[in-house]
Amino acid sequence: MTDIIQHVCLIVYVFALISLFTYGINCYVLMIFYRLNQRGANLNHQEIKKKFYDSVQPADWPRVTIQLPIFNERYVVERLIKSVCHLDYPRELLEIQVLDDSTDDTVEIAQSIVFEMQGQGFDIVYLHRRNRNGFKAGALRAGLHTAKGELLGIFDADFIPNPDFLKESIPYFMDPKVGMLQTRWGHINSDYSLLTRAQSIGIDGHFGVEQASRAWSGFFLNFNGTAGVWRKKTIEDAGGWQADTLTEDLDLSYRAQLRGWKLCYAPNVVCPAEVPVTINAFKSQQHRWAKGSIQTAKKNLGRLFRARVSFLVKIQAFLHLTHYMVHPMMLLVVLTSIPMLYSQWFFDQIAFPIMVFTLLCLATCGPSIMYMYSQRTLHSEWKQRIKFIPLLMCLGTGIAVNNTKAVLEAFLNIESSFIRTPKYGIRARGDRWREMTYSIPLSAVSWIEFFLGIYSLTGLILFLLFSKYLVSPFLLIYTLGFFYVFILSVKHGYGGVRN
């Protein structure tokens, strides 16, 4: 019986290692494609703008509707609406929809600001739903019915578009095949704390390398839910906004591309945003993205594999949609590490520890090198910023429990409530959120993180006692990650005011 258990653990352990290795190696692949296409893509952005403004007169620019889906955003709704009203675009061609599902005083705040902006001559309307059917997807779908624009810009409440956002974006739609343009997220509060620093680096890795590489290489990419522009016809042709996944943006992106539409990405166009300042807000955001990604994969992978696209595009799309599977794989590696330690025949053969070390090293270093590369690409002070990458590694491993729960819920079709990511209007280090509403309380997941921290620490000590040093550094990362996320969850879970 013991031998059977050991063999099962071996199979699980090796499967998880190979899976992590595959996702880690893909980071190198994306960096290679990014490097090959970078120069031509940057020149293309300037050429697209020049061609548009040389050939299209302002009177012929497309009519644009800006949609602002909000829910209980008392601290940032004024900032959002006024920043959109400051967009440098002809007023007669710009409509603004405030799509409000709020249940608190955000309703009165938003209404008063809309009334104020209407008095200044803006074409802005306030649409309030008394139910939240479909959540954000439902709000966008409701606004789509009355939208006047042929192009639709979408901004979440934590974003502050620059005045030139539309002038930088609309030239891409000269090509009738382009259905969407995603722009790069910036950060207004990355220096607020160690947590926001780590998140900003992670976001830079996605937008600085991943999205650019996919767009420039002809792979499938996704709309990130905000700071982007859609062609109205594309949304309608792809089946509209659908609420059967938690990532309606990712789902629509894949349905549109499977219909033959081209999605573009403009890393040169940056839209500043507020990064979540509490770990529990970050975890709720990650849970939604992880669960929604797997739901979208279940919904669309069959059509994708049958589509007439290249094998490489299909592989990249599969890795893209299932990326959050790395977190269950991390937990499997941790949980089977101690049983594997007692399989002396496995670790007594020098080839096996070297294989494990190599796979873990490549899997761990792939994302880290990509984050480092993104910092060097995007920031002149990249050398100061990359010192926070170890913190990001701990954060990425520490949320494995949270995201594994999300992945399992998606596979098992378990319904879960939609938890919004609270925004507090935090910018400077001196700003405080603890006296504000919308705080997310501590959950039972945090205690699992604590026990896994203990388990990882036990494994680390045992590996050192058994003189198995090659695997020990990775158990150290898991130990620090679980304890870091647990401690922050407790600290932030007992601060702030519930809604």
Image (cartoon, rainbow, N blue to C red):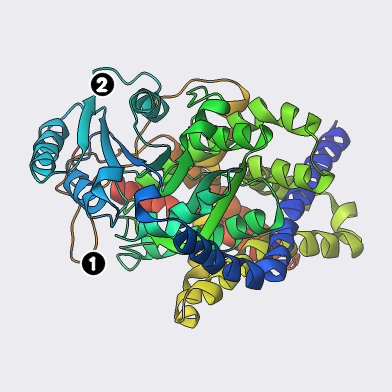
Mark 1 nearby-residue class (10 Å; few <14, some 14–19, many ≥20): few
Mark 1 residue element: loop
Query: Is residue 417 visible to us here?
Result: yes
Residue 298 picture location, percent across and down = 66, 27
Quadrant where the image shows the C terminus: top left
Task: Name which residue type carries label 2.
Answer: Arg
**Is 184 left or right of 9, judged from the image as shown?**
left
Residue 306 picture location, percent across and down = 80, 29
**Front disc: 2 or 1:** 2
Residue 91 picture location, percent across and down = 24, 47
Q: 293 and 352: which one is in front?
A: 293
Q: Pointer 2: what residue?
A: 129
Q: 371 and 168: which one is in front?
A: 168
Numbered mark located on residue 352 in the image = none
Q: Pointer 1: what residue?
A: 429
In the image, residue 201 sits, relative to residue 279, either above or below, namely: below
Residue 275 picture location, percent across and down = 35, 55
Q: Earlier in the sequence, mark 2 or mark 1?
A: 2
Residue at (32, 55) in percent of width and height: 161
**Is 127 left or right of 145, judged from the image as shown?**
left
Residue at (71, 31) in percent of width and height: 301
Task: Name which residue type carries label 1.
Answer: Arg
In the image, residue 271 sits, relative to residue 181, either above or below, namely: below
Mark 2 nearby-residue class (10 Å; few <14, some 14–19, many ≥20): some
